[in-house]
Image: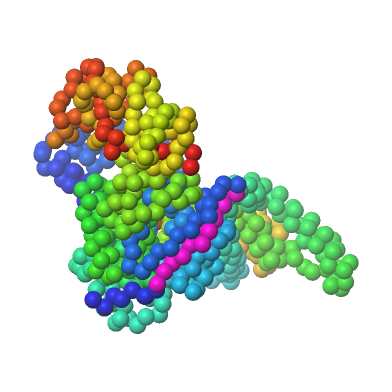
Amino acid sequence: MTIALQKFDELRLDQVRREFGSLNALRDVTLTVKRGEFIALLGPSGCGKSTTLNCIAGLLPVTGGAIWLDKRRIDTLRPEERGFGMVFQSYALFPHLTVKQNVGFGLKMRGVAKAEISRKVDEALALVRLTGQAQKLPGQLSGGQQQRVAIARAIVIEPPLVLMDEPLSNLDAKLRLEMRAEIRRIHNTLGATTIYVTHDQDEALSLADRIVVLKDGVIRQVGTPNDLYEKPAHIDVADFMGFRNRIRGKVIRQSGSRATLAIGDSEVTGIMRASVQDGSEAYAAIRADDLTTGEAGANAFAAQVETIEYRGREFVGTARTSDGIDLVFRSDHAVALGSGVHLRATPDRVLVFSEQM
Amino acid sequence: MTMTALVENQAVESGSNLRQRLAARGFDAVTLLLIPAFVLLALLFLYPFGYGLVLSFEPKAGAAWSNYARFFTDPYLYSTIWKTLLLSVPVTLVNLLVSLPVAFRVRLMYRQRLLTTILVVPITLGTVLIAEGLLNYLGPQGWFNRVLLSIGLIDHPLRLVHNYWGVFASLVINGFPFTFLLVLSYVTGIDPALEQAAATLGASARQRFTHVYLPILMPGLAITFCLSFVQAFSVFPSAVLLGEPAGETRVISIAAYQAAFEEYDYSMASAIAMIMGFVQLAIVMGMMATRGLFYRGPVAGTKG
């Protein structure tokens, strides 16, 4: 392997701001990325994740703050001076150039000798497993192959940092899983540093070393996939981590790390993820997996089944309580539509978030 | 593309009825809607063209080709080809080369519409109005000369109309909006992510233009050149009104006009019209041949 990515120690975003007119797309984003990390920027559309990536790449100027690559300030440099490899959502392959010319484009712009370009391009194509397609035009390739060309083109210039903007969103579900594994394999083989933008939490959880959750241009939480999955710090993060039930209630008592909420006629106890005060409004967040049919009692909601879907090993249904709260639950047996059920979750699997954070 | 071919083959092989087989090749009842267009084309183009061609070989006197022989031996006639080319080729190139940077700038603007409207206004004015305006503005007693005289930059009025440059200016003003609109549509048709990708790969602004935009634009620019050139080549009103119709702007259409309506020699006029047509055709075909050298596929690049 002679594709050797340039070494650096860390990329630092220091209170980066980006305004579009009066809209604050990014507000004081501060983040440090260490060499060799795979970072996922996760968030709903319009949260600022692509804006962050474009600011790092230099495609969008920042309107405040600074970006540092080790001791070098890079936010004032033009994109062609930064030398980061970028994979675009639309792939952005040059339609008039062959696969080989596409991949060799960056090296050609740098004035690398022809023989050297040819050698490196062949190596990059071998790495993304596209040998034999070198003379084709992008229009003759399938979506997955185009994606591989885009990756080869970004890494062949040996960038310190690889930026990926929702690279899998145009692929079908099966290919997406396959390319996901490919991207991680390439990252590991090269020892690359990758910043990966996605709105898909499965992608973020399975690929990243650390996940950055953004919402409304603000970083909500940074952590390992396990941290975020088990201990989301914010109700918005919980939303992204599969807590499909987010139920509002009033705090009636606390003991140790637990708080109990009154929600309609039910009382629900869970683990506090932030300090809450008695009498204040708060959210209880429960994954559909952790809410199952059982006996009436504490931590149970009486509800009527509205839909039920077969998922192979289990059933997933929705139900509505008499107070009009919609719940998503799991069941290991079929439940009749319209029947009354008691849906329970153990307190260990319920998280309590304060209303404002 | 291979998919459609496959479907077609299956339809043909399975021995289906005539209607299905035609439909597989893209012919159905809707195709009949093309008939009026064909009729119009035949009546307004093919018939007059054929009539003119035959007429040009029926001279008032002499052998069938004597009109053509006369044209190519009389310098007063054959020089009109060069005079017309000398006007139309530079004008087309100027329009194209000015449109390109303007289109690149306009592409990035938020208020594209307003600017485009302003740029397109000359198209609606018509040649005669523009000629009259230019005569008033650039003439010996026009504002332009008077301003230059009064600030002492010149001693005698510059001769800007009733010569080559008057016609040149008028053709630029008339032709620019058309050229610009075509170029703008080609430029905006290119996915901006291509330029961004080139930038992240280290290409400077100049390299992005020469390695990405220009090769993708080339076929479109060739077509724009052809269409603008044909317009400029058939210049008539401005060559008469703003030029020197007996001298350096005696373009080929003036020669045809004089043959038809001053000498009443329709046969000769037809011959000149035919020659005019073939010169245009030669230039256009030469231009289209260069298209083969460039990429001509979709400009979006990849499936979105």
Q: Residue at x 75, y 53 (%)?
A: B133
Residue A166: image x %, image y %? 35, 53
Q: Is residue B15 left or right of residue A324?
A: left
Residue A20 belongs to the span the image colors magenta: yes
Which residue appears at 57% of the width and 59% of the height?
A64
Protein image colouring: rainbow
- Residue located at (32% from left, 71% from top): A156
From this viewpoint, is residue B59 visible?
Answer: no
Q: Quadrant of residue A120?
A: bottom left
The picture places residue A47, in percent across and down from the top left corner, at 45, 47
Figure label count: 0
- The image quadrant that residue A296 belongs to is top left
Q: Give the residues drawn in magenta, as a range.
A: A9-21
Figure check: B123 above or below B167: above
In the image: residue B45, left or right of residue A104: right
Q: Is residue B82 above or below residue B132?
A: below
Asked where in the image residue B238 lies, by quadrant, the reply is bottom right
